[in-house]
Amino acid sequence: MDKFSYIPEDLRPDETLHTDHAQCFRAIKDQTITKEDFFPTFHEKRMQKAMNKVESVKVCFKQSDYSVSLFNTIDKIKKIYDVSPIFRKKYNWVAKGFTSRSRGISYAASKNGHIDYFLYDFEGNNPYQDFELIQEINNE
């Protein structure tokens, strides 16, 4: 399988921008970390469209939709949790781990602490084993 074969050519990440993150955080749904917790955003959007069976709605993707969203601190996740009822309803736990060039390309954290992690193969080389559950979000 070609690296990033699921990402359109014009939206593939720039490998020269790769930054390793020895520690990063991911909001997850339940107490058990699964492979699905690390599927990119576009996959989730595509599944929602299929479940709604709405064919007339076109789902447009931007580059970050093909990444897994990570954050450089737990506080950045809690900030989203505090202001977004949708996020709060969907995610209850935080996992801590790292990014690895062997799994994909991760960009430097943005001003808001967001890290785009573009996986080479999100199904067969998924990073869920690189993360461990550390706490419930609403449990300080």
Image: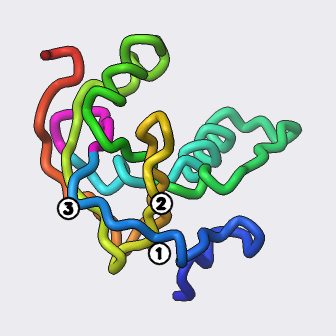
In the image, 108 versus 119, the foreground residue is 108
Question: Residue flagged by tag 3: what amino acid is it?
Answer: Asp
Q: Residue furthest front?
A: 111
Residue that label 3 marks: 130
Q: Dot 3: what SS?
A: helix
- Relative side of 79 to 112, left or right: left
Q: Residue at x 38, y 12 (%)?
A: 82
Which mark lies nearer to you, 3 or 2? Answer: 2
Which amino acid type corresponds to the residue marked 1 in the rendered image?
Tyr
Quadrant containing the C terminus in the rendered view: top left
Q: CA distance from mark 2 to mark 1?
A: 14 Å
- Label 3 neighbour load within 10 Å: few <14, some 14-19, many 20+: few
Cα separation between marks 3 and 1: 15 Å
Q: In the image as oriented, which residue stretches furthest toward the bottom?
A: 1
- Which class describes the residues within 10 Å of circle 2: few (<14), some (14-19), or many (20+)? many
Q: How far apart are the alpha carbons under marks 3 and 2?
A: 17 Å
> What residue is pinned by disc 1?
120
Q: Secondary structure at mark 2?
A: loop
Magenta span has 27?
yes
The residue at which mark 2 appears reads as: 107
Q: Vertical placement of 116 versus 139: above or below?
A: below
Whether 4 is among the magenta residues is no
Residue 8 - label:
none
Q: Position of residue 64 (x, y in %)?
A: 60, 51
Q: Position of residue 11 (x, y in %)?
A: 71, 65
Q: Position of residue 86 (x, y in %)?
A: 49, 18
